[in-house]
Image (cartoon, rainbow, N blue to C red):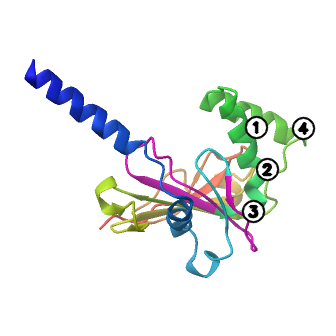
Amino acid sequence: MKTFLSLLLLFIGFSALSQTVPSKDIQIKLAVLAAPEDQRAGATVYAFDGALLRKGTNQTVCLGDDPGREGLSVSCYHSSAQPFMERGWALRKEGKTADEIFKIREAESKAGKLKLPDQGSLLNALTAEHADVNWTTGEAKNTYTRSVVYIPWATAESTGLPLKPAGPGLPWIMDPGTHRAHIMINPARD
């Protein structure tokens, strides 16, 4: 019984810790880590739930970490992708699955109802293990950043990109021929 209670208390304590939302300033500081350094100060920043944390002055938009998930995961992208992102948020709030969201956005973009970036649009996604993040100061170490360049409707044939990476850090195309076609660049991990 003592073991059960100990495990229960440990689980409750861990759950409470992982669901604590950092202050607005810390959320912003962590979110902009995924942005190029020269764009961080002017970036617009949204919380993980889509709430606006800071209105920016440049073309960069950042999404904060979801405190309900283990570790740090933030991203920043070009403002031309904002309609695409906002539509995904709205569909998720409606309870749609990832596959349903893909199909709905595909149909809406083909019908001209959903605006997509009309040229390459960068997204950087930065992650770190929970233990590598100081949730009080907003500092992170041992981070990993992968990059995505959205190129709607592009194919392997139209770009010359392979369908899988030829080696660590080399670009490849994902979701070719769709509204969500993009170049993936996953640097080798140290």
Residue at the left extreme?
2
Residue 101 falls in image quadrant: top right
Residue visible at 47% across and 55% down in the picture: 22
Numbered label tally: 4
Gap between marks 1 and 2, in whole Å? 10 Å
Residue 8 position (above or below residue 130): above
Q: Secondary structure at mark 4?
A: loop
Q: What is the quadrant of the N terminus in the image?
A: top left
User: Which residue is disc 3 drawn over?
Assistant: 79
Point out the tag, 4 or 2, that comes first from the N-terminus.
Answer: 2
Point out the tag, 3 or 1, that comes first from the N-terminus.
Answer: 3
Left/right placement of residue 70 relative to residue 155 reads: left
User: Which residue is disc 1 drawn over?
Assistant: 105
Residue visible at 35% across and 36% down in the picture: 15
User: Which residue is disc 4 drawn over?
Assistant: 111
Return the x and y of residue 93 as percentages of the image width and height: 67, 32
Left/right placement of residue 54 relative to residue 165 reads: right
Point out the tag, 1 or 4, that comes first from the N-terminus.
Answer: 1
| Residue in the foreground of this view, choosing between 59 and 28 | 28
**Highlighted range, magenta:** 52-76
Gap between marks 3 and 4, in whole Å? 21 Å
